[in-house]
Image: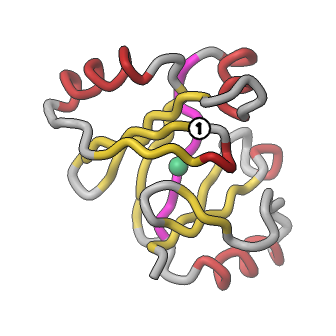
Amino acid sequence: MLKIEHLGIAVKDLKQSIPLFEQLLNTPCYKTEAVETEGVITAFLGVGESKIELLEASKPESPIAKFIDKKGEGIHHIAFDVADIEAEMKRLAALGFELLNPVPKRGADNKLVCFLHPKSTNGVLIELCQEAK
Ligand code: ZN
């Protein structure tokens, strides 16, 4: 794994949370992007080499809506940058980690992504991501 690519934070309302994180980090949100297949709208802010990804549900059955119902707003996942996502998925699956998608899928911010089930990672939802070419 190359670095922590971003931290995902589930929020109820991007309109409120974007200005809050802009103030907190003292940097503007540089991008918002809807990921229809995941039912989320994302917003990104840079922190050094890393990013904060704010996630708002775009429909009631979105995993983010379910997460907020259960746990409230807060840290949702940690994303690690990897050089070769398929090799990394193979390596982790062989070690017994549970992959939530068997093939890399298209995520926000021009990434190929794969999530690991939190029950196999001490309760932390992990995202692997690789820059899509
Ligand atoms: Zn993410």
Q: Is residue 61 left or right of residue 113?
A: right
Locate residue 35, reporting x and y percent. Answer: 57, 48
Where on the picture, by quarter, is residue 71? top right
Locate residue 81, reporting x and y percent. Answer: 47, 67
**Residue at 16% across / 36% down in the picture?**
27
Q: Secondary structure at mark 1?
A: strand
**Secondary structure mostly seen in the magenta stretch:** strand
Residue type marked 1: Val
**Quadrant that contains the C terminus:** bottom left
Q: Is residue 15 left or right of residue 63?
A: left
The stretch of residues the image draws in magenta is 73-81
Task: Tell me if I can see residue 64 in this picture.
Answer: yes
Above or below, 15 relative to 88: above
Is 76 magenta? The answer is yes
Q: Is residue 15 left or right of residue 98?
A: left
Is 85 magenta? The answer is no
Q: Is residue 88 left or right of residue 2?
A: right
Is 45 in front, or is 58? 58
Task: Tell me if I can see residue 78 in this picture.
Answer: no
Does the Cβ of the disc 1 residue fall within 8 Å of ligand 1?
A: no
**Residue at 78% across / 50% down in the picture?**
117
Locate residue 68, reporting x and y percent. Answer: 66, 20
How many residues crowd around disc 1 within 10 Å: few (fewer than 14), some, or many (20 or more)?
Answer: many
Q: How is the image coloured?
A: secondary structure
**Residue at 58% across / 42% down in the picture?**
77
Is 16 in front, or is 52? 16
Above or below, 54 relative to 15: below
Q: Which residue is mark 1?
A: 40
Where on the picture, by quarter, is residue 105? bottom right
